[in-house]
Image (tube, grey):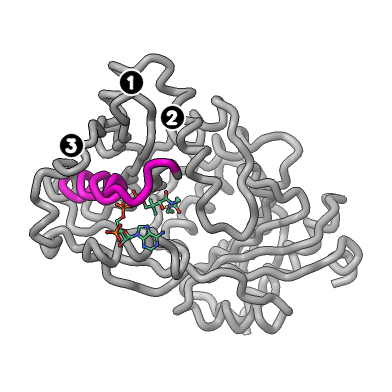
Amino acid sequence: MTLYVVRPFEETEQEYDDLASLLRVASTGVRPVSAGELRQEDQDWPAGYLFQRVMLVSSGNVLAAVGTSYQAYWQEAPFTVHIRFDIHPEHEEAQVLSLVYAGLQRLVAESGKKVKRLASRVRENEGVRIRFLLAQGFQETMRSPTSVLRTDAADGTISEEAGGKIAQDGVMILTLNQLKAGVPDWKRRLRDLRWEIVQDVGSTDPFSKPTIDEFEEMVLQDPALDENAYFVALNAAGDLIGMSNLWRNDPSGKRLETGLTGVVRTHRRRGIATALKKRTVLYAKSSGAATIETSNEEGSAMYALNMKLGFRPGPAWLDFSKAVTSESISNH
Ligand SMILES: CC(C)(COP(=O)(O)OP(=O)(O)OC[C@H]1O[C@@H](n2cnc3c(N)ncnc32)[C@H](O)[C@@H]1OP(=O)(O)O)[C@@H](O)C(=O)NCCC(=O)NCCS
């Protein structure tokens, strides 16, 4: 059995470098983040919201795993703490998980925050983690299958002029670039559109309305943003009524990820989301991407629409949570 030491994160150059290296191998399929970006994210985390890490090191101070606990400032859930495990694949998950979990609980208890719920997200093919969470008393709360569209296999109708049908209703689709150039007050209006849609997205906790600055930081300053792969639908009166975008989280550009897709309630079931999604697929094909990936709550309208467009299901993300009290966390 490997001997480990659990200790808090230290904000040194070396620690950020080690963290960035670990995250690259521990969480494949997400955008690699540099040490500088991690430091910036830490600095930008809103004051008053928990964000802590524990480091699990083996002999020689080699980083084996990182546990993160945080409060999601984009949700209305002041008593929920999310926990996340990033584990180097060479280390035995079962042993590492319990050490990191204990370290995280200690940090949460020391923070003095009132906590009523711990939440964690795993993939359904991560059996060791699922068994671990169940053994700790967590329960599954939501299932969101991933799905993938291979652009070379995309249905023939995708290559029809995307948006031809909705144009008859006076609906047009602009890229974010075009929106910025031609639509006054675009930033506030796009934030409002996104907020209107987000409230209808299946989630374990309700979302909170972002300020313009938060919207700017979460969306417009995301390094994975591609303004030509961000589509917004406007009706004949010029109202913003729908959106869909692709994130460039894969530096090679081969894999693109769907961001928030949505249409305001008054304009649903008129083919607008389909037209927006078709624009994203056409964009992906023209940019040389091989796949588009996404995940949606099982049984949702979006999932049904994606299946219709030719996306094929993959392993689901599972949300787990556990009711706790500040006392139970302290006495773990
Ligand atoms: C999902 C959503 C984007 C669909 O937008 P839309 O413009 O109404 O979709 P479309 O008109 O293009 O629908 C195309 C097809 O998708 C399926 N679909 C759409 N809404 C559906 C629903 N509520 N239930 C079941 N199937 C649905 C249908 O097959 C539909 O074809 P049909 O109308 O001929 O039956 C919209 O309901 C929405 O904004 N929901 C809230 C936001 C959200 O959850 N987004 C996904 C998370 S990223």
Distance from the alpha carbon under mark 3 to that under mark 1? 24 Å
Q: Disc number at residue 168?
A: 3
Dot 2: within a 10 Å radius of its alpha carbon, few (fewer than 14), some, or many (20 or more) residues? Answer: many
Q: Does the CB distance between marks 2 and 3 fall below 8 Å?
A: no
Q: Give the quadrant of the C terminus.
A: bottom right
What residue is rendered at 32% in x and 30% in y?
234
In the picture, measured across the screen, residue 245 lies left or right of residue 202, that is left
Q: Position of residue 74 (x, y in %)?
A: 61, 43
Q: Is residue 36 visible?
A: no
Looking at marks 2 and 3 on the same chain, the residue that comes earlier in the sequence is marked by 3
Q: Does the CB distance between marks 2 and 1 fall below 8 Å?
A: no
Q: Secondary structure at mark 1?
A: helix
Q: Does the CB distance between marks 3 and 1 fall below 8 Å?
A: no
Query: Residue tagged by mark 2?
Result: 190
Q: Which residues are magenta?
A: 266-282
Q: Secondary structure at mark 2?
A: helix
**Main secondary structure type of the part rendered in magenta:** helix
Give the mark toward the camera: 3 or 1: 3
Query: Residue tagged by mark 1?
Result: 180
Q: Give the quadrant of the N terminus.
A: bottom right
Give 113 or 200, whichever is nearer the viewer. 200
Looking at marks 3 and 1 on the same chain, the residue that comes earlier in the sequence is marked by 3
Q: Amino acid at mark 2?
A: Leu
Distance from the alpha carbon under mark 2 to that under mark 3? 24 Å
Magenta span contains residue 258: no
Q: Secondary structure at mark 3?
A: loop
Q: Is residue 146 visible?
A: yes
What residue is rendered at 80% in x and 60% in y?
116
Q: Amino acid at mark 1?
A: Lys
